[in-house]
């Protein structure tokens, strides 16, 4: 394991807040939980530089300007700007003007790495939420609850963190996956898959029909939907398979061909890999 590295200059106002939290065993095993949380009003010599800290960090700029160095890039931080980073990666952030005022939360949890991987998948960028007041309010509430040690603070803070992260994920992915920006050929492809998933479908033939290479069409599909063409098709087929398992008496063999697959063993293995039980077990479970 690589050594933790940190250096900093604590140039902040007297009313700045830095609260270190010790989570319960329940929180560590179940929730997203706060490690540290605070409010800083910083001045020109303030900076933090670190690497290899097992934590995730969200910083929301209230006023002034800051600077972030992350993923080999530099970003100017203005009011409303929010960054969400893994502190295992090298990071440097500082006041870059007369002052930089911000709220911040260090957190961890059983699902923290998964959330961050989803956020970073389209690429890292600074987020400026549409509803800054809501995000700022949620961060302030987490700060207040953590300081007061309300009996329900941990579960409420976990819910608030989920809300904040969800907004950041949606905002980061919306540019890539919004229907308003989606090319007509991708919309047409999705409509075709939705209507014909029970049939044998070839990406090569689809690509030829749209005048693209299979590689390009597959890449563009994932760009706008976040999953591959084949995964989208599998999801459609498994959803329909579940419907038939629950509400029909068709055999597993018949269901395999009804959903557009040709090999029963492949269907069973695919279903088990996604659902962690066989199609027959799924039927019995949902027909009890």
Image (tube, rainbow, N blue to C red):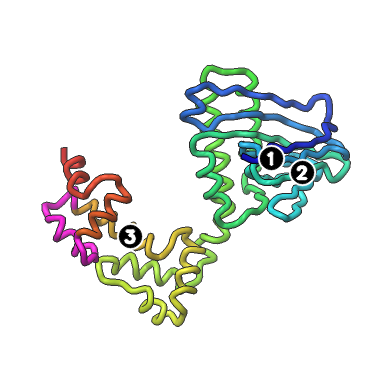
Check the image and report above or below for 60 versus 209: above
Q: Secondary structure under badge 1?
A: strand
- Secondary structure beneath dot 2 equals strand
Label 1 packing within 10 angstroms: few (<14), some (14-19), many (20+): many
Say if mark 2 contacts mark 1, CB within 8 Å: yes
Q: Is residue 231 above or below residue 188?
A: above
The residue that appears at 62% across and 29% down in the rendered structure is 35
In the visual, does 127 lie left or right of 115?
right
> Which is closer to the viewer, label 2 or label 1?
2
Left or right for 5, reference 269: right
In the rendered structure, find residue 59 and report the number of the disc placed on it: 1
Q: Is residue 133 visible?
A: no
Image location of residue 118, percent across then percent down: 52, 50
Kindly check if marks 1 and 3 are in contact, taking CB atoms under 8 A apart as contact: no
- Tell me if residue 12 can be seen: yes
Residue 250, disc: none
Ranked by sequence position, the earlier of labels 2 and 1 is 1
**Residue 64 vertical placement versus 25 (above, below):** below
The residue labelled by disc 3 is 234
Q: Is residue 100 above or below residue 249?
A: above
Which stretch appears magenta? 245-264
Task: Report the front residue among 128 and 97.
Answer: 97
Total tally of numbered discs in the picture: 3
């Amino acid at each position: 394991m690589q050594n933790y590295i940190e250096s900093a200059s604590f140039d902040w106002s007297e009313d700045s807040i830095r609260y270190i939290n010790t989570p319960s065993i329940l929180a560590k095993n179940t929730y997203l939980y706060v490690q540290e949380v605070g409010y800083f009003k910083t001045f020109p010599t303030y900076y933090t530089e670190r690497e290899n800290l097992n934590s995730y960090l969200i910083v929301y700029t209230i006023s002034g300007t800051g600077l972030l160095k992350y993923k080999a890039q530099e970003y100017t931080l203005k009011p409303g700007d929010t960054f969400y980073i893994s502190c295992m990666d090298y990071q440097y952030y500082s006041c870059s003007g007369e002052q930089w005022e911000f709220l911040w939360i260090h957190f961890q949890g059983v699902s923290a790495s998964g959330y961050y991987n989803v956020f970073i998948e389209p690429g890292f960028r600074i987020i400026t939420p549409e509803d800054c007041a809501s995000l700022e309010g949620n961060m302030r509430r987490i700060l207040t609850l953590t300081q007061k040690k309300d009996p329900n603070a941990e579960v409420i803070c976990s819910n608030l963190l989920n809300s904040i992260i969800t907004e950041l994920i949606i905002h980061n992915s919306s540019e890539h996956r919004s229907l308003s920006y989606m090319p007509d050929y991708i919309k047409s492809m999705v409509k075709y898959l939705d209507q014909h998933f029970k049939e044998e479908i070839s990406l090569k033939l689809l690509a030829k029909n749209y005048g693209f290479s299979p590689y390009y069409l597959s890449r563009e599909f994932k760009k706008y939907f976040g999953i591959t063409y084949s995964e989208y098709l599998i999801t459609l087929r498994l959803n329909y398979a579940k419907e038939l398992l629950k509400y029909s008496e068709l055999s597993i063999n018949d269901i395999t061909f009804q959903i557009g697959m040709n090999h029963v063993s492949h269907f069973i293995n695919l279903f088990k890999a996604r659902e962690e039980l066989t199609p027959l077990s799924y039927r019995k479970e949902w027909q009890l």
